[in-house]
Image (cartoon, rainbow, N blue to C red):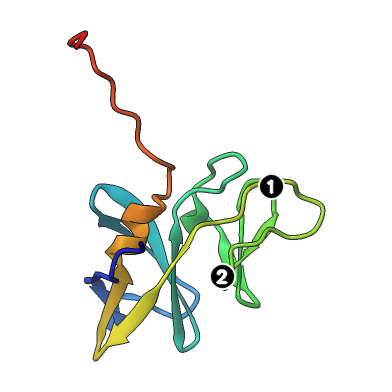
Amino acid sequence: MTAEPDFVVVATLDRLADKAFLRVMIDDHGLIVARDGDTVHAFQGTCPHEKADLAQGRIEGCRVICPRHLASYSLIDGKVSRGWKVDALKIYPVRIEGTDIAVDAAAVRRDPPGGARKRWDLTGG
């Protein structure tokens, strides 16, 4: 059973210029929201290939381009450009509520940007 969407406000539109990136946090998970014209996208903050900071990249044609190795990822489905065999970029649902940018926190919890966190049991129990 999939959790119900849980949209939380992470920023306002006036803080995000066209083609700009903004780092945000949801439940201790770092994400990026980016504006491409009238559309706002939310995605994991690091490249799935070498963990480069995607906020240092750029947006072209609804794709984010990694600043380190120039592969690009679709901002619609996260698929990487041809020739690369790496995981897809994790994309999260966004909606605009007036001037607020809201991201689905339930989707972030379900598929966190860095993968599932490991918990160590050091009690021996």
Disc 2 versus disc 1: distance between alpha carbons? Answer: 17 Å
* Lower sequence index among marks 2 and 1: 1
Q: Between residues 87 and 73, which one lies in front from this camera angle?
A: 87
Residue annotated with mark 1: 69
Q: Where's residue 33, x and y in %? A: 39, 67
Q: Where's residue 76, x and y in %? A: 57, 73
Q: Quadrant of residue 94?
A: bottom left
Residue lying at the far right of the rendered structure: 83
Q: Where's residue 115, x and y in %? A: 43, 42
Q: Is residue 115 above or below residue 91?
A: above
Residue annotated with mark 2: 75
Nearest-to-viewer mark from 2 and 1? 2
* Disc 2 element: loop
Residue at image coords 31%, 49%: 29
Label for residue 124? none
Quarter occupied by the C terminus: top left
Quarter occupied by the N terminus: bottom left
Q: Where's residue 9, x and y in %? A: 22, 72
Q: Between residues 75 and 112, which one lies in front from this camera angle?
A: 112
The kind of residue on which mark 2 rests is Leu
